[in-house]
Amino acid sequence: MKRVFFKGFELVVYDSVYEPREDSFLLAENVKVKPGIKALDMGCGCGIQAINLALQRADVLAADINERAVANTIENARRCGLSDKISTVQSDLFNAVENRKFDCIVFNPPYLPASRLKDASVEGGKYGYELLHKFLDKIPLHLKENGFCYFVQSSLDGELRTKRKLKKLGLGFEIVARQKLFFEELMVFKAFFSKL
C-alpha cells in the first residue's frame, strides 16, 4: 500500500487504485467551489478530489467503476475526518447516478491510448480520448443550469478535438491551468452551459 500527502493529510492508496500524480494535484489545485454545493467526483480513485471538494465544504458523491477505489475513498474520507461530507457509489460513469444533477462535477480521466484495455485506471481507449468523450456526452444531463465541470485533458489526446466536442454539446469552457511535463502538457478544463 502506498501513501501520499495532500493538504496536511496522509492518504493511503490501495493496490489496483490510481496513485495521485501531477494530473491529480493540478486538478485539485484549480477546483474552486462554494460551501454547500452538491458535487460529484467521477472516477474517485483514492478519493483525493472528493477530499479536496469536502475540504471546501461541498457535499460530495464519489463514484468509481473499481470497487477497490470506492473502498479506498471511504477509508481516506475517514482518515481525514470527512466521512459526513463524502458518500460513495460504485458506478460505470453515470450509470448509478442516472437521475441526479450536480453543481460541480470533477473528473481526472484515464487518457493513455491502448489498443486493448489492460488498466482502466490509466487507459482511456484506443486513441486515449474515448472515455473522456463518453463522459462529456452525459455532462448536459447531470450538470445543474449554473453548474460547472472540471476535467483533465492531456495533449496526447488532442486538445482541439475536446474543444470541438464541448462546442457541439453546447458547453462553454475555459482552460484554467496548464502544466508542461516531459512528454505531454496537462490542461484543466472548466466547462459550463454556454450563455450564448
Image: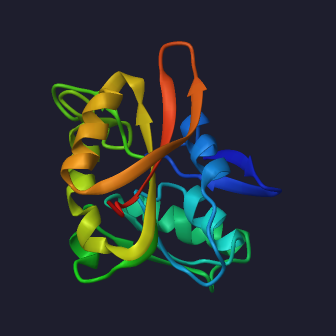
Q: Residue at x 50, y 35 (%)?
A: 187
Q: Nearer the viewer, residue 116 or 166?
A: 166
Q: Quadrant of the C terminus?
A: bottom left
Q: Is 135 rendered above or below residue 26?
A: below
Q: Nearer the viewer, residue 80 or 136?
A: 136
The image quarter in which residue 24 lies: top right
Q: Residue at x 60, y 56 (%)?
A: 31
Indicate left or right for 130 with 146 as reference: left
**Position of residue 92 measured from the top left corner of the image (x, y, whole percent):** 25, 62
Indicate left or right for 133 with 56 as reference: left
Indicate left or right for 115 with 40 as reference: left
**Position of residue 10 measured from the top left corner of the image (x, y, whole percent):** 76, 55
**Position of residue 143 measured from the top left corner of the image (x, y, whole percent):** 35, 71
Indicate left or right for 112 with 95 as reference: right
Q: Residue at x 73, y 70 (%)?
A: 80
Furthest toward the right, the residue is 8
**Position of residue 127 measured from the top left corner of the image (x, y, whole percent):** 21, 27
